[in-house]
Image (cartoon, coloured by chain):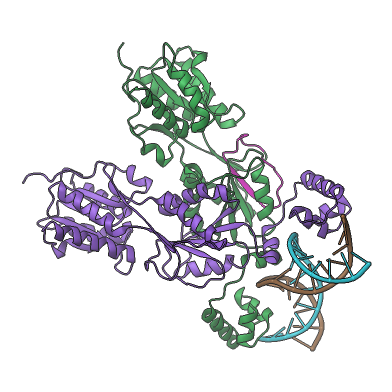
Chain colours: A green, B purple, C brown, D cyan
DNA sequence: GTGAAAGCGCTAACAG
DNA sequence: CTGTTAGCGCTTTCAC
């Protein structure tokens, strides 16, 4: 900025005024400064500006890692931000954040740099943060923070009913982590639908999968190695469902002929596996867009429902079929 | 930081030393300060820190918009950053950047905030930028900047040969924008493969699609409305290929029975359309990871090839088939 | 081993 | 209308 000021023969304060469109600058000065700015390709440093002004027009999206789930939200947020005049800053430690990443990233960015934040699947939710914050699918469920999530319970019911409707009775549930709200709700939905159909749940068929390939591996093997293996598996997210498909194939089982598998999330990757995964879709892009709109309204001080829950939908692809007659 | 200093009964300078692990702090002071930091959940502001220190341990990824292409790169970069100790900051204006977004975002973030940047599909490439910069698939082709891209020419040859091998002869090419390097190379590859097979190119079947649905719409209609329409279309990216499929269906043509369509990129979305798209895969995640590694090496001053070109691969799905006997 | 002071690039008051 | 001045929260000499 000093460069620009010197070249234009004015003070940095004047340049600042031009850059920020403040009143009190002569038309001639303005155009001269603007010319120099264009010529030099000057752009104010976000860091320095925000340090002083506490308004940046930048919204943060804080994620533990850029993976299929968070990037879908990002697409939605990106589409929604266009109209608002804000810019988007997505921050991630690349998976190295460890526990408490959400709080650390937030304090690192808030107060300076961003006017508000969307935090994706936070474990620790803090109501007070300095800037407005919206949580997407917090692991503790809707609490003090404004929240956007999908209807995990209803989705799990849909998944289970789909399997039941196909004729399955020996259905396994490969859950998430029991301490997470979404995982709990999906198990509840599963049990609810089973009970409603009058099909008893074999407790040995209910396992903790942990939402990730590595953690789902052992329980999946245990499930499929049984004397009387399940004819269908409902996995609480796509990542673990995909892993079930892989394990089944490695064991010589054909999907869906020998085993039906249904997932949850509908990340794009679920369509890429062989066979393409039947799953329960969360409207991820829509959730990202909704979270962003909610955040903007919060910043603008508009009244809004503090909790948005979006519906899920069954996406039938090729990993589910009626059980084979025995 | 002043809070922490006051509570611990030391100066902010000392707190700073503790935070940054500098030498010259008594063990007792260190542990006391560390305790207060943990208790208060203090985390240094990125903006302020970077303003002063010019080393942030944060790498930037600058994109025009978060869409399927850039988010795939993001996933790769995120996976690769884990080992490096850096954190990732992805910045986007949400599509409102306009021309020259790459330069503006870069000067906004560089010098402060980030130690280096990966710029995704920049149009304007500037060799000198203040911080190390790596370009992914720059629209002008490899120039002064270190670059990561895929082999567009070879990929286009693969696509064309696939169609030729299926028996197609009347093959249309729906190109990108002629001013973009990747688009030009894909057309070259198409012509090269046609010539090698001794099949003359009907110039009326070569159209400019512009890489986007909106820009591809009119040329696609023109192509399919011909008296003698093509039996196959090679679209220069998945987005336009998907649009060709949609237009064909809206015209009552069945894909692939009446018309084969092949795309380029292999974004996850290409598998989600009906029928799933046959396409040429760019190893997008790998490209993102490679760009990040190249950037880190650049920052560390390591010698590295300044241009990495990754191979493409044919992904056969269901949008291509032999032409119908007439 | 610790703190005082200067200053990173910018904006906001205020004086001229 | 324009420039001077005082910080924003932090790191970094450099005295003590």
Tell me the residue at 24%/41% (across/down): B318
For the residue pair B305 and A244, the one nearer the viewer reads as: B305
Quarter of image, res D8 = bottom right
Q: Is residue B37 above or below residue A275?
A: below
Count of marks overlaid on the render = 0
The N terminus of chain B is located in which quarter?
Answer: bottom right
Task: Return the residue found at the far front.
Answer: B303
Magenta stretch holds residue B324: no
Q: Is residue B136 left or right of residue B206?
A: right
Q: Nearer the viewer, residue B143 or A254?
A: B143
- Residue B117, given in percent of the width and then of the height, sits at 53, 62
Q: Is residue A261 above or below residue B148?
A: above
Q: Position of residue B157 (x, y in %)?
A: 23, 56
Q: In this rendering, does residue B251 appear at all?
A: no
Asked whether, in this view, residue B296 is left or right of residue B135, the answer is right
Q: Nearer the viewer, residue B82 or A254?
A: B82
Q: Is residue B86 above or below residue A145?
A: below
Q: Is residue A136 magenta?
A: yes
Span of residues in magenta: A125-143
Q: Main secondary structure of the magenta part?
A: loop
Instruction: Please tell me which residue is depicted at 56% across the width and 83% down the height of the picture.
Output: A36
Q: Say whether residue B187 is visible.
A: yes
**Farthest-out residue, left:** B326
Q: Position of residue B245 (x, y in %)?
A: 25, 49
When asked about the image quadrant of residue B20, the answer is bottom right
Q: Position of residue A201 (x, y in %)?
A: 49, 14
């Amino acid at each position: 900025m000093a460069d620009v000021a010197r070249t234009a023969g004015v003070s940095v304060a004047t340049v600042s005024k031009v850059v920020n469109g403040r009143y009190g600058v002569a038309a001639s000065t303005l155009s001269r400064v603007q010319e120099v700015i264009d010529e030099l390709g000057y752009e104010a440093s976000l860091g320095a500006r925000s340090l002083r002004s506490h308004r940046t027009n930048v919204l943060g999206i804080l994620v533990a890692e850029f993976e299929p789930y968070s990037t879908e939200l990002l697409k939605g947020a990106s589409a929604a931000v266009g109209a608002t005049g804000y810019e988007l800053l997505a921050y991630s430690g690349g998976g190295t954040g460890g526990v408490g990443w959400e709080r650390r990233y937030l304090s690192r960015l808030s107060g300076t740099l961003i006017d508000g934040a969307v935090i994706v699947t936070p474990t620790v939710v803090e109501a007070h943060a300095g800037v407005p914050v919206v949580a997407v699918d917090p692991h503790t469920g809707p609490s003090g923070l404004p929240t956007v999530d999908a209807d995990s319970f209803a989705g799990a019911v849909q998944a289970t009913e789909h399997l039941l409707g196909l004729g399955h009775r020996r259905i396994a549930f490969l859950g998430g982590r029991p301490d997470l709200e979404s995982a709990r709700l999906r198990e509840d939905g599963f049990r609810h639908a089973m009970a409603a159909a009058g099909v008893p749940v074999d407790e040995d068929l209910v396992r903790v999968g942990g939402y990730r390939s590595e953690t789902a591996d052992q329980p999946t093997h245990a499930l499929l190695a049984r004397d009387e293996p399940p004819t269908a598996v409902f996995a609480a997210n796509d990542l673990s469902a995909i892993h079930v498909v892989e394990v089944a194939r490695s064991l010589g089982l054909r999907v869906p002929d020998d085993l039906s598998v249904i997932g949850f999330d509908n990340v794009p990757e679920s369509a890429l596996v062989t066979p393409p995964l039947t799953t329960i879709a969360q409207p991820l892009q829509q959730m990202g867009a909704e979270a962003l709109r909610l955040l903007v309204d919060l910043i603008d001080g508009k009244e809004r429902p503090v909790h948005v829950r979006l519906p899920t939908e069954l996406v039938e692809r090729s990993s589910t079929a009626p059980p084979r007659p025995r």
